[in-house]
Image: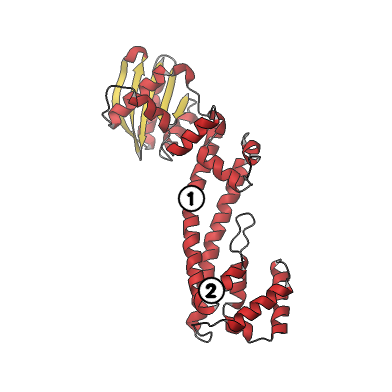
Amino acid sequence: MISVGIDVSKGKSTVCILKLYGEIVASPFEVRHTESELKNLIQMIQRLDGEIRIVMEATGIYHLPMLSVLQDQNFFVAVINPFEMKEYASRGLRRVKTDKQDSITIANYGIDNWYRLENHQVSDDVYSELKLLGRQYCHYMELHVKALLELMHMLDYTMPGVKKEFHSWSESNGKDKLSDFVERYWHFDNITAMTKEDFIEDYISWAAEKKYHQNRSKAATLYDLASDGIPTLPANTPSTKMLVLEAVRVLREIDSTLLKIITRMKELAKTLPEYETVRAMGGVGDVLAPKLIAEIGDIRRFHSGKALIAYLIWI
């Protein structure tokens, strides 16, 4: 019974190897995440005599290189939730937190929980990928909000009030009616340069081209809005068109990235056994379901609803 405790950090890890009853096989030592040093670590572990279980704490993306290398060698590798490891560490008398001490704690956890350890499964990699995608989705959503606000700022100069007439980007299908409309017309003067009847026909043609509802009443409302509106930037200045269309372009670039990310998240989530259960929850659609799984992970590891709520409060 040999427990290899690995405290992972960015670019390096601290390793401690223990036997039953705390017998030290190898005192804590540092291993950089390079091919040569990881190869030496693997050879060292392979020389150990006895059943070996490697234990590491999940640390965002930093543990993935070490995990990948060890799994390629068919080692038993248990990846422990940081909250569970923190709870275990808090029971000890020593509260000193160093990489060396943490590696000892992790190795001791392996000994104390030997028969509860679970070998990391390939499906766990799906959760890791989902979590990474989820975090990047949040990042790009922040950029989306900023880009949308910038477009609305420009529209206050050229098409005041038009935003309330359109929905912006849709997570479900990636369409953005506001951006499409602004790209076509971009200034109220371009609308009022036509007669009301001509604009309605032009709007209907545009809606058909973009596969939107061909609503004549909507077109008439937009023409009236343009007629009553007071743009504060002239349409005949080249900078006006450039700034409005650049705001549209930037927003679309971000939205394109968001759509790629959420599409990939949907693909991954649908491969997981709990997807249909999460999808069936009230108010959870095909966009929210992968986001929930990305943040929670394997929901089956929670023995009750209270355990799930406690975890959500903690994160």
Sort mark 1 into few (<14), some (14-19) or many (20+) by Cα contacts within 10 Å: some
Instruction: Pick the residue in front: 108 or 18.
Output: 108
Q: Which residue is mark 2?
A: 245
Please tell me in which quadrant of the rendered image residue 216 appears: bottom right
Left/right of residue 107 with respect to residue 196 in the rendered view = left
SS class of the residue under badge 1? helix
Element at label 2: helix
Q: Position of residue 68 (x, y in %)?
A: 47, 34
Q: Residue at x 27, y 31 (%)?
A: 98
* Residue drawn at the location 48% of the way across and 66% of the way down: 149
Q: Nearer the viewer, residue 298 or 35?
A: 298
Which amino acid, by three-letter code, is at mark 1? Gln
Classify the position of the C terminus by image quarter. Answer: top left
Where is the N terminus found, in terms of image quarters? top left
Q: Which residue is mark 1?
A: 136
In the rendered image, is residue 183 in sight? Answer: yes
